[in-house]
Structure formats: structure tokens, C-alpha cells
Image (cartoon, rainbow, N blue to C red):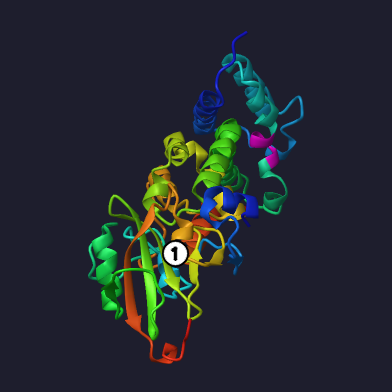
């Protein structure tokens, strides 16, 4: 498992924030799968090497493709990562509009991310994972969660 | 005196052995006693060693190739027809010999492979982008090692996991991964392939 020093070295914005490790490392699923709550597949548009990509979507790492996949799962685009009562949000991180990472917001308003082949973490804000590898959270989507209507922040 | 590479030694050894076996009426020498000074296989082997100036690593292993591999598992066949036994053992020697040479070639690459694999793992373990993983320079360098490094990649896959499926497909020109397989199934398929091919125990 990556050490705290490694994590904070790669994600300096996490330093001094309340983040937590939530799983052991695994190369079975990645951040995109995690955003869809799929813990059995590594999602990437290169199927055929043990990799999963939803059928019917272009084999491209363009952000637009991932947005379309999220829409197929009931999400719609929104402006930011702020907590909205009754909505679950996801963030897409990109560099030059190429997908680099995805994270999803939890009922608590915190964010959850799978760090590559390493562990899942919970972090306070989506922007705490901005770095040179993940780029920045450039696109946000949300979907209604009736069971989150009672959430107050 | 200059020595030849393990690969060249291997090729010469097989050429020599195949020629030797084609001779009709050759005595049915006992492979398991090839260490005997009077053994035809030993005298032939020694003559070949002198001619080809065996590289040290192959010299260390030649006895294993010729005799040791043909030990315990095949002694039960001693009572069988001598001629059949002879050809069966020749065939077995061929398979095991090829495995040994594959291993010798891989061992020469081990230090370089280990350094590259470590670099790749450390520099890509936080990445979700499979493109960024496989386009990493260390990963590409390992692919460029070619078939000789396949046993090392399989060992790495077995012991440390990792997404080596692209590399293996390019290095082996094979793809044992069934359509629709996930990472776990792809890993199992490659490890089974490696065991079937004799690259893994």
C-alpha cells in the first residue's frame, strides 16, 4: 500500500486536510469503475485486455465519451462540485480533455476516489486531487438520489 | 578463447543432437549414465563442447540438459522398448532443453527487467489511465525486450500482479484472454498460459 508520504507527495493539496484510506490496494478496478460503484472491472476504452468499457460507446478517452456514459447512468451535467441536497455528484478530471481520473461524492458531501492500482480514499474536496497526473476536475455531473433528500450540510 | 552466446550454444547443441539421433543403428546408450566416461553421449557431448567453445553458463548446465532432465520421471520407462525409449527421451530433451535456454536468455535480462518493472510500478501505480500505463517508457522498454523476457513478465504478474496483458500479447504474439474477461480472469488466463508453456511452475 502506498505510504502517506507517497500519497501526499503526489497529491500535495491533501496535506493538512482530513482524508482517509478506505481500502487495500487492488488492480481489479480503477477510479472510473469506482465512480460507477463497480468493484469488479477496470474501466478504460481498451477492451480485450481484461479491461471493461460499456458496449455502444466510442473507444476513446475523450471526456465527452465518459460524460455520455454517465448520462446513460442517469446523470446530467452540472456546474460544480458543491453539495446539492438530494443529488449525488461525480467529477471527471482531465488534461486537454482526455480522461485522467473520476471521483464521486458521498452522502456526507465528502468525495471518494480510487487511486489507480492503490487504495480508495475519502477526501474533503474534489480539487484536493488536482495534480500533474490527474489534471483537474473539469466536468461535473449529478443525479437525483431520493434517499439523499434528508441530507443537510 | 572466445566463448559463444547461450543462444548460439543452444542452436549448435540442438543441431548436433539432432544429427546424432538421425544415425541409424546407433547403440541404445543409457541417458541416465551419461556421466560415465565410456558413455557415447558423454564423449559426443565433450567433443561438441570443445568444438563450440561453450559459454560458461551453458557449460554449467549441459549435463542437466543431456542427462539430468531425463532422470526420475522417465526412469520408470527403462523396461520399455529401448528404441521407443530413445526417441521419447530425445523428444523430452528437446522440450526441456528449449525451456532451459528460454530461462538462460531471461536470466541475462533479469537485472534490467527488474529495474524497469520497479520504475514502471512506482511511476504508474496511481494512474487509472491504461494508455498512460502502457505508454510509459519503462513498459515500452520491457516490450522491446521481446520473447526472451516473457518468463520474467509472467513471474512479475504472478508475484506482484500488474497490468502486463498488453506487454505479454505483444511479446508472445498470443492472447489467451477470453473475450469479456476482467482483470482477474485475464491474469489467470496468462498464468495458465505460462504454466502450460513451462515458463512458470
Residue B74 is a magenta residue: no
Q: Which residue is mark 1?
A: A126
Is B110 located above or below residue A30 in the figure? above
Q: Which chain is disc 1 placed on? A: A
Task: Residue at 27% x, 68% y: name it.
Answer: A67
Residue B2: image location, x then y, percent: 59, 10
Of the pair B15 and B117, the residue shown nearer to us: B117
Residue B31: image location, x then y, percent: 68, 38
Q: Inspect this view and state whether residue B94 appears.
A: no
Q: Inspect this view and state whether residue A40 appears.
A: yes
- Report the magenta stretch's main SS: helix
Give the residue furthest to the top: B1
Residues shaded magenta: B64-68
Secondary structure, mark 1, is helix
Mark 1, Cα crowd under 10 Å, few <14 / some 14-19 / many 20+, is: many
Is A123 located above or below residue B115 in the figure? below
Task: Residue at 49% x, 32% y: name it.
Answer: B22
Q: Is residue A8 left or right of residue B170?
A: right
Is B114 located above or below residue B185 in the figure? above
Amino acid at each position: 500500500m502506498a505510504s502517506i508520504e507517497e500519497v501526499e507527495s503526489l497529491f500535495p493539496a491533501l496535506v493538512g486536510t482530513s482524508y482517509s484510506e478506505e481500502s487495500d490496494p487492488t488492480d481489479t478496478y480503477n477510479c472510473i469503475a469506482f465512480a460507477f460503484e463497480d468493484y469488479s472491472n477496470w474501466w478504460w476504452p481498451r477492451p480485450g485486455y481484461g479491461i471493461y468499457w460499456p458496449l455502444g460507446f466510442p473507444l476513446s478517452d475523450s471526456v465527452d465519451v465518459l460524460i455520455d456514459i454517465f448520462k446513460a447512468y442517469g446523470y446530467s451535467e452540472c456546474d460544480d462540485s458543491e453539495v446539492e441536497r438530494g443529488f449525488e455528484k461525480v467529477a471527471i478530471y482531465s488534461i486537454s480533455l482526455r480522461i485522467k481520473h473520476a471521483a464521486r461524492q458521498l452522502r456526507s458531501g465528502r468525495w471518494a476516489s480510487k487511486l489507480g492500482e492503490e487504495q480508495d480514499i475519502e477526501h474533503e474536496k474534489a480539487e484536493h486531487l488536482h495534480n500533474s497526473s490527474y489534471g483537474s476536475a473539469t466536468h461535473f455531473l449529478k443525479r437525483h438520489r431520493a434517499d439523499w433528500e434528508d441530507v443537510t450540510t | 578463447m572466445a566463448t559463444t552466446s547461450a543462444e548460439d550454444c543452444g542452436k549448435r547443441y540442438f543441431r548436433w543432437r539432432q544429427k546424432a539421433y538421425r544415425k541409424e543403428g546407433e547403440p541404445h546408450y543409457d541417458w541416465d549414465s551419461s556421466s560415465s566416461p565410456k558413455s557415447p553421449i558423454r564423449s559426443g557431448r565433450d567433443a561438441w563442447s570443445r568444438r563450440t567453445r561453450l559459454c560458461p553458463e551453458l557449460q554449467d548446465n549441459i549435463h542437466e540438459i543431456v542427462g539430468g532432465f531425463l532422470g526420475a520421471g522417465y526412469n520408470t520407462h527403462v523396461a520399455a522398448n529401448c528404441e521407443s525409449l530413445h526417441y521419447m527421451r530425445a523428444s523430452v530433451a528437446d522440450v526441456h532443453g528449449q525451456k532451459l535456454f528460454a530461462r538462460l536468455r531471461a536470466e541475462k535480462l533479469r537485472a534490467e527487467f527488474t529495474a524497469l518493472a520497479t520504475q514502471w510500478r512506482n511511476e504508474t501505480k496511481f494512474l487509472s489511465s491504461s494508455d498512460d500505463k502502457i505508454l510509459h517508457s519503462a513498459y515500452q522498454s520491457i516490450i522491446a525486450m521481446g520473447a526472451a523476457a516473457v518468463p520474467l513478465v509472467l513471474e512479475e504478474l504472478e508475484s506482484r500482479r500488474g497490468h502486463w496483458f498488453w506487454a505479454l500479447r505483444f511479446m508472445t504474439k498470443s492472447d489467451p484472454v477470453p473475450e469479456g474477461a476482467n482483470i482477474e480472469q485475464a491474469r489467470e488466463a496468462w498464468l495458465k498460459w505460462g504454466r502450460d508453456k513451462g515458463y512458470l511452475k
